[in-house]
Image (cartoon, rainbow, N blue to C red):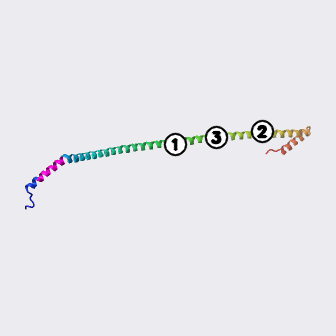
Amino acid sequence: MNLITPSFGLLFWMLIGFGILYFILAKFAWPIIVKAINKREAYINEQLNAATKAREEMKNLKSEHEALLVKAKEERDAILAEARKMSEKLYEDAKAKSARESQLLIDEAKQTIHYEKMKAITDIKNEIAQMSIEIAEKVLTEELSDKQKQEELVAKLVKDVSIN
């Protein structure tokens, strides 16, 4: 058992060596280690705070993005509605213009037909007047003294000049 139990001198020197090592570590190493651990802890806390801030900013950006998306959709709908209104207005204007132009063409055609009708009636009247003059001329050239001959002549001329 002598091998397992240390002697008093060895214990003494081990305690002195341990005390010196403890003093050196406590004086020089532990403050640096504690400082590094505190620094690391502060860094980790800082990173956690930054991550939380980033998450909040992402939420804000997401809500802003959604708001912008809604606004853009509303603007698009408004633009489409305005374009639809303009299209309908242009269609109605073109339709009204077409109706006016077609009415003008119809009025012009009616006026032309009226003038042509009046011209035809005038031509017929002139022709009838010319025929009347010719009939009167032929009647006068015949013997005017015999009434029966005049009547026969008029009947014959009327048959010859029949108007269809």
What is the x, y in percent for residue 30? 20, 47
Q: Report helix, strand or loop for mark 3.
A: helix
Q: Is residue 105 left or right of residue 59?
A: right
Q: Quadrant of the C terminus?
A: top right
Q: Which mark is residue 101?
A: 3
What is the x, y in percent for residue 89? 55, 40
Q: Report helix, strand or loop for mark 2.
A: helix
Q: Residues within 10 Å of mark 3 (few under 14, many from 20)?
A: few
Q: Which mark is residue 83?
A: 1
Q: Residues within 10 Å of mark 2 (few under 14, many from 20)?
A: few
Of 134 and 33, the residue lying toward us: 33
State the image quarter where residue 56 is shown. Answer: top left
Query: How far is mark 2 from mark 1, CA to CA?
Result: 57 Å
What is the x, y in percent for residue 122? 77, 38
Q: Report helix, strand or loop for mark 1.
A: helix
Identified at 71% across, 40% down, the residue is 112
Q: Is residue 98 left or right of residue 52?
A: right
What is the x, y in percent for residue 158? 84, 43
Classified by dominant secondary structure, the portion drawn in magenta counts as: helix
Q: Image height check: is 5 above or below 102?
A: below
Identified at 59% across, 42% down, the residue is 94
Given the image, on which type of amino acid does mark 2 rest?
Answer: Thr
Count of marks placed on residues: 3
Given the image, on which type of amino acid does mark 1 rest?
Answer: Ala
